[in-house]
Amino acid sequence: MRVVINMGGSILASPKPNIEVIRDFAGMLISLKDKGHDIKVVVGGGKLARDYISTAKGFGADWKLSDKIGIAATRMNAMLLCSALGDHASKEVPDDTESACDSKKILVMGGVKPGQTTDAVAAELCVRCNADLLLIGTNVDGVYDSDPRENPDAKKIGTMDTKRLLEIVGEAHSPGMAAAIDPVAARTVHESRIKTIVVDGRRLKNIEDAINGGEHGGTVIVPA
């Protein structure tokens, strides 16, 4: 399959780069590539991005500059993963998705433009590269009907369609937002009918199992 993995920075580099997790993730990506999968990865900014965005806002930075700062953090995390992948990865972290489909190696990228998170970059990459699956690895175990970090009664949804996803995520983007899927990505997933799975990326096997059709414990989002 051609798979785009959006890996949260909260997993790879929060509160600081986690060498063991990055190394293990790189090893899993290489294994998936060796099995014939075409793998493309978009990496989030995590705590590094949120800390820098918060500081910039304290200085009066507008949303556009705040987003650019967050994008820089995602690209730093992407370069760390490239380092772990070595010769298995494309050497450069792309500035956009236009040429990303041409890579014969494992492609790794971060954010590209203000107004969206790396979720949206991953969704756009799926459309451009005609991917079979968008897989989102985050620090929660799926999509809930409300934020489980704020509402102890929030209920996880095992399977849902993209219309329900749009209802849950709303429409507003904000720099550094930490929703399971951002509104821009949700619209792309809905309009382009992208099969999407959200899993707890803290257990790397969930990602591998989701790609291989196994039990992953996350949320499956199907086209409406």
Image (spheres, grey):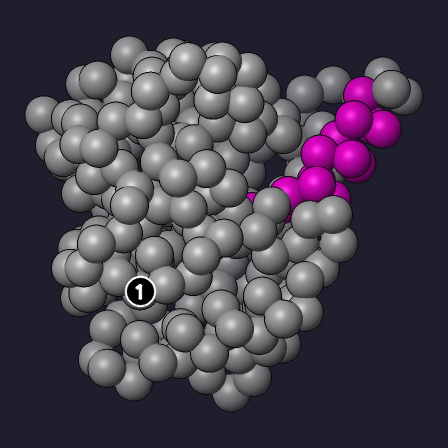
55 displayed left or right of 11? right
Quadrant of the drawing holding the N terminus: bottom left
Task: Classify 119 as above or below 93.
Answer: above
Say above or below: 112 vs 98. above
Please report the residue visible at 60 percent of the width from the left and 57 percent of the height from the top. Answer: 12
Question: What residue is rendered at 46% in x and 78% in y?
Answer: 27
Magenta residues span: 44-57
Q: Where is residue 62 in the image (x, y as percent from the top left)?
A: 74, 18
> The residue tagged with tag 1: helix, strand or loop?
helix
How many numbered badges does the structure rendering display?
1
Residue, disc 1: 208
In the image shown, does 98 or 63 lie closer to the viewer? 63
- The reply to whether the magenta stretch includes residue 75 is no
Q: Residue at x 79, y 36 (%)?
A: 52
Residue 72 lies left or right of residue 193; in this view the side is: right
| Residue for point 44% across, 57% down | 203
- Whether residue 206 is visible, yes or no, is yes
Q: Is residue 49 magenta?
A: yes
Q: Which residue lies furthest to the left in this view?
A: 224
> Residue 124, how many percent across, how many down?
33, 43
Q: Mainly helix, strand or loop, the magenta region? A: helix
Q: Nearer the viewer, residue 35 or 93?
A: 35
Residue situated furthest front in the rendering: 153
Q: Assign the C terminus to one quadrant of the image.
A: top left
Q: How crowded is mark 1: few (under 14 residues within 10 Å), some or many (20 or more)?
A: some
Amino acid carrying label 1: it is: Glu
